[in-house]
Image (cartoon, helix red, strand yellow):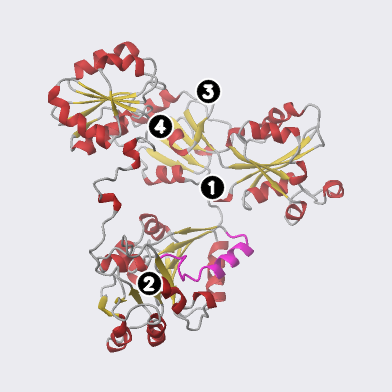
Amino acid sequence: MQKTAIIVSGESGRATADTLLHELNAIEIARGEVGKQWHDCRQFIFVGAMGICVRTIAPYIEDKHSDPAVVCVDSRGHHVVSVLSGHVGGANDLCRLVAAAIGATPVITTLSDLDDLWPLDTLASRYGWTVAAGTDTNKCIFAHTQHRPTALLLEVHDAGTDYLERSLPPHVTVVHDIIEVSPDRFSLLIMVSPFNHCLPQGVQVLHYIPRVAVAGFGLAHHPADYREIPSQIAQAVSEAGISPEAIARWCTIDVKSDEPLVALMKAEGEDVTFYTAEQLDAVTVPTPSSVVASHVGTASVCEAAAILGSDYGPLVMTKRKGEHYTVAVAIDRQYARRQGGHIEIVGAGPGDPDLVSVRGRRLLEQADLILYAGSLVPRELTLCARAGAVVRSSADMNLDEQCQLMKEWYDRGALIVRLHTGDPCIFGAIQEQMAYFDRHHMHYHITPGISSFLAAAAELRSQFTIPGRTQTIILTRGEGRTPMPEREQLHLLARSQSTMCIFLSAAIVDEVQRQLLTAYPEDTPVAACYHLTWPDQRIYRGTLKDLARLVHDNHLTLTTMIVVGWAIDNRQGLSLLYDSHFTHLYRKGTE
């Protein structure tokens, strides 16, 4: 954790300083100690006049890439000024943090902040990228902040490229091939790519190299000059048009785990993964070798290892042979720029369209096909679909029909959103779909959602864990068409008298009540919650002895969450967080 020091000039700033000491877990030092602490603290907050701040730090300023962040707060706490190391050192972020802590106005003079432009000097550290050697970052930043015509080339997909695409400034144009970039159109090219390109003349280039590649390698038995092999592999990779800095992981066959080269790689912090010959031999590769098969029991090591290690991502460098090694490179499938299809399983939340996640909403807006669980997910959640997107309910489709429809769109290179109620991991019926996707090596990902049990707690205005009463929440269902394991029968789970949230069980409520009454007292609070957060939401409270009657009398259906336990409407019990003798760990300086 970075160390933050506060310097107070005069008693008029004492109240502001005390607040910041408490909120930021900072230390207070005297003005004369700044020089001694300059390299130990990463953040300095001056409370007082700007002149005092500037004169104090002036003798110690060296370089923006190594200087700490410095901000100055006026004694009344009205303004916070970013003084030194705005982007690179984090002073701009510290300025905003301090201003939020005391309700002040942040004062930031960095041009990219004023114009809401990308902070090009911090993107690499923020997203784990490397800036290509020889880049004149300052000239690139100047061109960007002057709104010069800029090309953006993205050849992977990660959190950083998502950010760039979402926040595209007006002077930036997305291009899909470097041949589109010429000096008559652009002054600057920003690219996020694991590949080395022949760069256009007359254009400033800022090349971010993301660590998204997986290298598979084979190795001769205990080569004497193994220390030379890493540089030889790096040269081979570079000659194939791939930046060696893009390699995040190395993979090979397990019989090579005791090689000195592997020990050297691990000692230098490289991530090395091993596969058995059986695992490797199951992979179809471009250049199998019968000779390799006769020696280690698999027709490929380097290509198969790269493919497995990348989760069947695209192989961008087929086998290359050195004197004592073979190497191949693939792009990790999760980062591969979508040229084929992609399926996103999205948790829709409990029903209210406002309760889908920000990421889920963005995917719904981008999707080519939205396939939603029509009997459980309100169609209103799909109204944000873009023009031309296809929106289908799966209510009248069996599993094969759903999977075939998604595969058809996937093979066209489409983005498919499979929209499931609540969070997909809870009674979401996604396992069978994922098995199908895995079998066909289809690229998919899961966006979590808010479960209906969380919506129940919110709508009931109840904390489901009560100190001294219950510290456990059980999520389960009664036994209907889907059998329950014997050890998970309701009457056994009820013995703990925890807060229990029972899904999909309104149709068998009589049996549910019977089993619960074997362990819970009959006056245990219950709630039957129908269509949580939907426009026709209804909630019925009572006690366990009346549960079946509540459900039957109000004609509640399968879309009903049953909550049982003393946590409902409970206002008793004191959390340790509010105990006067309790101190947060971070305030003790132990985090």
Q: Quick one: label 2, few (<14), some, or many (20+) residues within 10 Å? A: many
First along the sequence among labels 2 and 1: 1
Q: Does the rendering let one see residue 45?
A: yes
- 484 left or right of 6 in image: right
Tell me the quarter of the picture where residue 60 sits: top left
Q: Alpha carbon of mark 2 to alpha carbon of mark 1: how far?
A: 46 Å
Q: Nearer the viewer, mark 1 or mark 3?
A: 1
Residue segment shown in magenta: 423-442
Of 492 and 326, the residue lying toward us: 492
Residue on which the image places disc 3 = 134
| Helix, strand or loop at mark 1 | helix
Residue on which the image places disc 1 = 335
| Helix, strand or loop at mark 3 | loop
Tell me the quarter of the picture where residue 230 sits: top right
- 490 left or right of 112 in image: right
Task: State yes or no: residue 436 in magenta.
Answer: yes
Q: Amino acid at mark 2?
A: Gln
Task: State yes or no: residue 136 in magenta.
Answer: no
